[in-house]
Image (cartoon, helix red, strand yellow):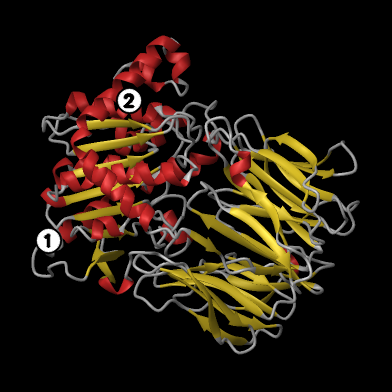
Amino acid sequence: MPEQFHAHRPAEAESRLELASFLRAERRRTRIALAHLNPLRLRIEDEISGRRPDNHTSAPFRRGAYLYYERHDLSRQHPLYLRRGVYGSQPEQTVLDLDAWRGSRGHVELLFKHICSRGDYLAFGIDRRGDRSCELYIQHIDTGALLRGPIEGVVSFAWTAVPGEYFYILHDRLLRPAVLARGSIARSETTILYVETNDQLALHLATCRSGEYVMAVSGGHAMNEVRVLSAVDLTTPPFLISAGRPDHFYQVDHQADQFFVLSNRSVAEGEIYQVRVEQPHECNWSLWIGSRPGRIGEAIETFRDVLVFWFRRGGLPHFAVFDRHGRERFAISGDQSAYELYSENNFEYAATEYRCISESLSRPRSVIAYDLASGAGRVLETYPVPRYDPSRYSVVRREVVANDGTRIPVSLVAHRDRPQDQKCPLLLAGYGSYGLSYSLAFSHALPSLLDRGVAFAIAHVRGGGEFGRSWHKAARGARKSRAIADFLCVAEALCRESYSTAKSLACRSGSAGGVLVGAALNRAPGAFAAAVLDSPFLDVVGDMQQDDIPLTSLEYVEWGDPRDFEQRAVILDYSPCANVVPAPYPAVLVNVNLNDVIVPPTNAFAYVRALREASISGAPILLNIQGLAGHAGASARAVQDRHEALVLAFILSRVGIV
């Protein structure tokens, strides 16, 4: 494989002229190869945009004296953030107009936004280039006056209880969030409070609803630790709750004179402890809510009168509400066999209702408010999706037994008219890294596959977070190949059990999931008819031994350290770029963004070139270069829809629909 494609900045490996020529040639090749799909792509693009309402205003949520909400309009590429007074005395105000902040190429990604407790000031962080170059701005909401900014490199932010004072996190030269600082609207100087020197930990801030404390969390893939910042007395230095140690993860929140701690120190599933604010160190923790079989703790949220405990059971999210004495008031789960459920805009410490989002692969999102005393729920909003009827689709959850006997959950959605007694086209997705659970959220694009007879399945392989940290550890580091084996087992089972065939089965993943799909193609190239890779991580050895690539040091726990001989041998066994061999590879579409600093686009350049040289099938191996967007792709809605339409047209053409 040519050495120049291992450099993570293409312009350093080749002259700019050679790079420009390479990009032009690849774009032309892909354009010609997919030209026959243009009519289908345009129809799908129209379908996707047609499932978005012309104008929609979200259900407002309260924060202080205001109600905040978003307005989505097809004439705009980004949401408009608005507010009005709780009692109707104040007219509607624009809080943030993202369209007005677009960069020269139309890109703007909102990384965070925080409104101070009095409602005067808005702090927001945006990336206008797609390369994680975050800029912090602070403005007065009423006047629109810009009070601070741009401040480069700010990746996390929290207001204090002192008007105009704030904490924030800066990243280092390799984009690792590492520096905790305090700033002020009234003063230009910065006070450095803490620098995280462990290069396998990254900082972020979490504000307690009580308004009295802010948590500075140093998190990594192997452990975390929490420092508490007083939001009231800014002269108090940060104090450490519990020093980090391998495989210990904990979260801290505040209520009255206590901290509550969700920790896995005794059991992997996690337990909730309480401790006095005056003596918060781990030796003083007392058990408040113990573990239960099958209930895996994920997060806690404290309010004045209750604590909300988020957990997973059977790989799916649930939450329970406890009073201040640890008595469970009620518990909530979804009403389908596979669903998504998560907290939404719960800012009020004295709240009497708790808001969450419920959605699934077949059902658009609904905002539901639950009475914190009785558990009674009321639907505040169901997101309107024109030209869509959720009753036409069915969602099922099933299991596939892996080679070692482990049961791998599979979520599957299909049109109800899809024949049940014959094998049909299917798209299989997976991820399997970082302890992240694969989202079961609704997609505006997916019905364009389902309506054409293609089912969609998600393999919840090990390495994700569906069953807690033990599920993640089972396919982390030296065990990474387990996730790949799980994915192939699911693909084989779906074909064996009459869901699909190898000639009509496609697969897709992105980012770290590129390792999953890329390695699966190397091990069983005949198992799939097509593969789509989005911003994929593919050259594990090449990237992980370059310490000038952003975030490399944070990744050693997940992938291994190739500087170590034994770990290098393990990585070489599964890394996609290292294992391309002459074989009948399926059609492959690799989507890359030139401003991607998380996964260098040269991963895709090297992989595509290697596949073209090795494949003996004659199927197209295409590189789709999406321009100067970042890792997550374009921010503009219309560009996202256009790209997704192209991907779906490619999949349909390879699984026998077109």
Question: Badge 1 local density, few (<14 within 10 Å), some, or many (20+)?
Answer: few
Residue 606 circle label: 2
Q: Using the rendered view, name the quadrant where residue 428 is placed.
A: bottom left
Residue 607 is drawn in which quadrant? top left
* Residue 231 at x, y percent in the picture: 83, 58
Q: Which mark is residue 241?
A: none
Earlier along the polypeptide chain: callout 1 or callout 2?
Answer: 1
572 or 40, which lies in front?
Answer: 40
Identify the residue at image location x=74%, y=59%: 241
In this rendering, position of residue 35 left or right of residue 254: left
Is residue 284 left or right of 647 when viewed as pictured? right
Q: Residue at x 43, y 65 (%)?
A: 467
The total of numbered circles placed on residues is 2
Neighbours of disc 2 within 10 Å: few (<14), some (14-19), many (20+)? many
Relative image position of residue 621 (x, y in whole percent): 22, 31
The residues tagged by marks 1 and 2 sit, at their Cα atoms, a distance apart of 34 Å
**Rendered residue at 85%/67% (across/down):** 278
Q: Nearer the viewer, residue 87 or 530?
A: 87
> Disc 1 designates what residue?
496
Question: Residue flagged by tag 1: what amino acid is it?
Answer: Arg
Look at the image and tell me whether residue 216 can be seen: no
* Residue drawn where x is 27% and y is 37% of the image: 589
The amino acid type of the residue labelled 2 equals Ala
Name the spot of residue 552 as percent of width and height, x first.
Answer: 52, 34
Left or right side of 137 for 465: left
When the figure is inspected, residue 517 is found, relative to residue 547, above or below; the finding is: below
Q: Is residue 651 above or below residue 88?
A: above
Name the quadrant of the N terminus: top left
Please determine whether, in this image, residue 242 is positioned above or below residue 200. below
Q: Is residue 388 visible?
A: yes
Foreground of the two, 215 or 34: 34
Q: Residue furthest left?
A: 422
